[in-house]
Image (cartoon, rainbow, N blue to C red):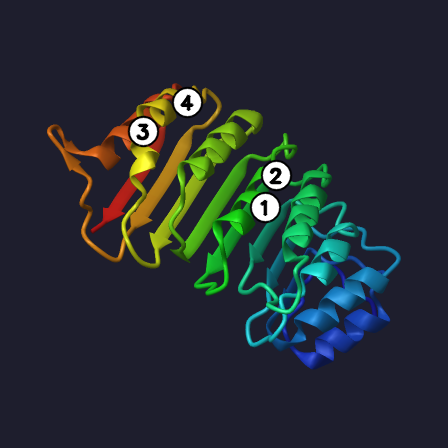
Amino acid sequence: MPITRINLTNSPGTRTKFKLYGYKNFSKLSAAGPYTLQTLQNIIRTPHLRIIQNFEFDPYLCDDSYLTELKLALKKLKTVKKINLVIRRLSNNSPRETERLKAIGSNLSKLLRIRKIRVEFPKTSNLEECHILTLFSSLQKSYLLKSLEWIIVESPLLSAKYYRVFNFLMKKLRKLEHSKEYISLKEGIPNSDVNDPEILSEVPKLSQIKYVEIMYSVSKEWSQIGDNGDLGNQIINQYLIGHTALEGHKLKVIK
């Protein structure tokens, strides 16, 4: 019985059908929950995945990151337009997780029909800034991307290098129209070097972005207060001014 253009649910029965009739067309695939590995393996083994427009990866209730399988599965999703990646953990027993994140970003950039990418790091206890920068910088060749959502829950403290990479990425994505950034710090306050005048001068002019959504949250009160108010406002204002074609924006700063 052919299955054409339906959402693949997280039920074992439907996944068994997918294994048997994997050459058929689906509009959405979800590798999530305890069946994440099984779904990724089915994608890798299937010779023909013709129409997949939406792909989701969220290995909740899993003990492994499955980044290796995700890297291989992305090569098969040649027609995908929207991707939602939830990186819940990095495998502690593998020193090659950074290389896998880089390969994942590289494979995303090779998807010629991709238009929207959402990446979320939800309370990843072993996540470091180098892992964030690895995946972030590897998206620089996603030239046709129109929407990018970047969410880091309970983030480690980010240095000025993160914002340099972020600014460079925004300049590379010339088709980008919608940008969303959500960052909540796990502990501490933003590093003072983020507001360095040199960083402010590097904020690019972004004429292609029409809508910006920014949300920052810290565990303690903002303490970078200068003679003219909160220094954090200075870099945010400078960033928004650079969007010359901006039609709307949403800004929220918690604490």
Q: Quadrant of residue 153?
A: bottom left
Q: Considering only vertical position in the picture, is 169 above or below 132?
A: above
Tell me the kind of residue under disc 1. Answer: Leu
* Position of the N terminus by quadrant: bottom right
Tell me the kind of residue under disc 2. Answer: Leu
Task: Give the residue at mark 2.
Answer: 139
Tell me the kind of residue under disc 4. Answer: Glu
Tell me the kind of residue under disc 3. Answer: Asp
Q: Residue at x 65, y 60 (%)?
A: 95
| Place of residue 28 in the rendered image (x, y in percent of width and height, measured from the top left) | 66, 58
Direction from residue 185 to residue 26 in the image, left or right: right
Viewer-nearest of discs 2 and 1:
1
| Place of residue 213 in the rendered image (x, y in percent of width and height, measured from the top left) | 37, 40
Q: Quadrant of residue 105?
A: top right
At label 2, counting other C-alpha atoms closer than 10 Å, the crowd grade (few under 14, some 14-19, many 20 or more) is many
Q: Quadrant of residue 251?
A: top left
Upstream in sequence: badge 2 or badge 4: 2
At label 4, counting other C-alpha atoms closer than 10 Å, the crowd grade (few under 14, some 14-19, many 20 or more) is some
The dot on residue 135 is 1
Circles 2 and 1: CB atoms closer than 8 Å: yes
Upstream in sequence: badge 3 or badge 1: 1
Q: Residue at x 56, y 29 (%)?
A: 173
Which element carries disc 2, helix, strand or loop?
loop
What is the spatial separation of the Cα atoms under label 2 and label 1, in whole angstroms?
7 Å
What is the spatial separation of the Cα atoms under label 3 and label 1, in whole angstroms?
25 Å
Upstream in sequence: badge 2 or badge 3: 2
Which element carries disc 1, helix, strand or loop?
helix
Q: Which of these two is toward me, 65 or 55?
A: 65
